[in-house]
Structures are given as structure tokens and as C-alpha cells.
């Protein structure tokens, strides 16, 4: 989370775009924390196990990893 935010804070993009990207990132982190951050670790891990991974961007292009729902 901190690395992603720091990357966005130091991105070379117009201030308006940076503000929007930071807000969108914060919203995604908050949604993830709300969905998986409460309850026991077992409950959180069980919920995470239901997520279908999607690979795109660097991992897909560089290593040919391709998983989609």
C-alpha cells in the first residue's frame, strides 16, 4: 500500500490526474480492508481464496503470465 501510494505521489503526471489516481487508489485499499480486514485471519483467508486472479500489464507482457476470471 505504501509503495503504491509513494509511486503515485511521485508520478510525473498532471496534478489533477495525480489527485484522481491517489483518490481511486485510496478507495480501492479501503474497500479491500473493509472486505478482508475484519474478523479472524481464517475468515479473511477463506474470503481471499475465492478471488479469481487476473494478470495484466508488466507480469503478463514480461513473463507471459495470463490468468483471467
Image (cartoon, rainbow, N blue to C red):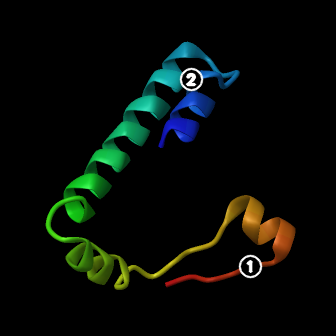
The residue drawn where x is 66% and y is 25% is: 11
Q: Using the image, determine if residue 22 lies above or below residue 47.
A: above
Q: Residues within 10 Å of mark 2 (few under 14, many from 20)?
A: some
Given residues 30 and 42, the one toward you in this image is 42
Q: Using the image, determine if residue 33 lies above or below residue 63.
A: above
Q: Which residue is mark 2?
A: 9
- Image quarter for residue 59? bottom right
Q: Residues within 10 Å of mark 1 (few under 14, many from 20)?
A: some
Left or right, 44 with respect to 9, comes to: left
The residue drawn where x is 57% and y is 29% is: 6
Left or right, 68 with respect to 36, comes to: right
Q: Residue 65: which disc?
A: 1
Q: Using the image, determine if residue 3 lies above or below residue 67.
A: above
Left or right, 58 with respect to 15, comes to: right
The residue drawn where x is 38% and y is 32% is: 23
Element marked by disc 2: helix
Percent position of residue 62, x then y: 85, 66
Percent position of residue 8, x then y: 58, 30
Question: Which residue ends up furthest to the top in the rendered image?
Answer: 15
Q: Are marks 1 and 2 in contact (CB under 8 Å)?
A: no
- Image quarter for residue 13? top right
Percent position of residue 5, x then y: 51, 33
Element marked by disc 1: loop
Mark closer to the chain start, 1 or 2: 2
Q: Using the image, determine if residue 53 lies above or below residue 18.
A: below
Left or right, 69 with respect to 7, comes to: left
Q: CA distance from mark 1 to mark 2?
A: 28 Å
The residue drawn where x is 50% and y is 37% is: 2
The number of numbered badges drawn on the structure is: 2
Amino acid at each position: 500500500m505504501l509503495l503504491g501510494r509513494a509511486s503515485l505521489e511521485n508520478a510525473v503526471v498532471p496534478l489533477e490526474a495525480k489527485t484522481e489516481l491517489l483518490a481511486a487508489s485510496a478507495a480501492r485499499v479501503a474497500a479491500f480492508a473493509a472486505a478482508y480486514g475484519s474478523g479472524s485471519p481464517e475468515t479473511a483467508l477463506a474470503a481471499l481464496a475465492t478471488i479469481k486472479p487476473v494478470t495484466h500489464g508488466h507480469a503478463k507482457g514480461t513473463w507471459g503470465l495470463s490468468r483471467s476470471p
